[in-house]
Image: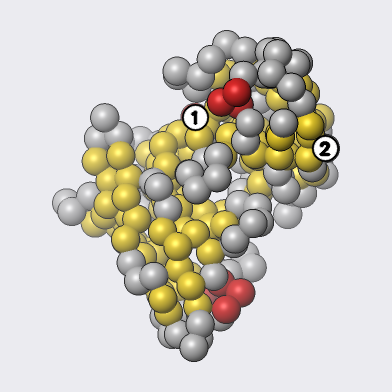
Amino acid sequence: QITLRESGPALVRPTQTLSLTCTFSGFSLTTAAEGVGWIRQPPGKALEWLAVIYWNDDIRYSPSLKTRLSITKDTSKKQVVLTMTNMDPTDTATYFCARRLGVLNFDYWGQGTLVTVSS
Amino acid sequence: DIQLTQSPSTLAASVGDRVTITCRASQGIAKYLAWFQQKPGQAPKSLIYSASTLQSGVPARFSGSGSGTDFTLTISSLQPEDFATYYCQQYSAYPLTFGGGTKVEI
């Protein structure tokens, strides 16, 4: 059974750095074509892809946010961490992590975690 | 970036209706297109990948078609549990991008 769960602060102050952890089970992130990505969704708006890290340490970022994002993995802990610097109220959103597996794309998702950026 | 335009943005339908949602890409993406269903307060659920392949466990009333720039998601007979917002997503090139969504309502 594959599960993913996001964790992190619910409230972040403007200019602070956000760190979110995706803890997964049911897969290893060491198998070819496996990856874990982050996607966010502002309230009432569409989905936006942020970053993905693959089994072979290949990493891709959204160009519009690349300078603010960092994604890392710890396969022994079965965790992927997303860091976003210089948070702004416009970054208020639900943040999801999801498994990516080749052409199956994002097949399993976490339930999401709402992050509010406010002073 | 590859832009995905979904239409309509909102669709009113009844149980039993045949529903079609379209997704147009700003450039050719072969068949690297996925469809997701999202209900309020829930995570997106993967329905279709590679434009037309159903994810495991997805009811057969859902189908996808298309290639290149024009794609459709069809629900052959709308069920009460299908009222939701649907998103397309391309994975032909980075950055991965999503459409703006189509809300299917009663």
Q: Dot 2: within a 10 Å radius of its alpha carbon, few (fewer than 14), some, or many (20 or more) residues?
A: some
A89 lies left or right of A112? right
**Helix, strand or loop under label 1:** helix
Q: Amino acid at mark 1?
A: Leu
Q: Where does label 1 land, which residue?
A: A104
- Rendering quarter of residue A115: bottom left
Instruction: Residue B97 in the image: state x and y as whole percent.
Output: 65, 49
Instruction: Residue A46 in the image: state x and y as whole percent.
Output: 65, 52
A119 lies left or right of B11? left
From the viewer's perspective, is residue B36 above or below residue B100? above
Residue B85's tag is none
A100 lies left or right of A57? right
Instruction: Residue B1 in the image: state x and y as whole percent.
Output: 73, 54
Kindly identify the residue that appears in the image at 71 percent across and 34 percent down.
B105
Residue B8's tag is 2
Kindly identify the residue that appears in the image at 62 percent across and 19 percent down.
B79
Q: Amino acid at mark 2?
A: Pro
Instruction: Residue B50 in the image: state x and y as whole percent.
Output: 61, 26
Q: Dot 1: within a 10 Å radius of its alpha carbon, few (fewer than 14), some, or many (20 or more) residues?
A: many
- Rendering quarter of residue B27: top right
A76 or A3: which is nearer to us?
Answer: A3
Q: Chain of mark 1?
A: A
From the viewer's perspective, is residue A101 above or below residue B14? below
Q: Nearer the viewer, mark 1 or mark 2?
A: 2
| Inter-mark Cα distance, 1 to 2 | 26 Å
B48 or A12: which is nearer to us?
Answer: A12
From the viewer's perspective, is residue A29 above or below residue B58? below
Kindly identify the residue that appears in the image at 56 percent across and 39 percent down.
B38
From the viewer's perspective, is residue B50 above or below residue B25? above
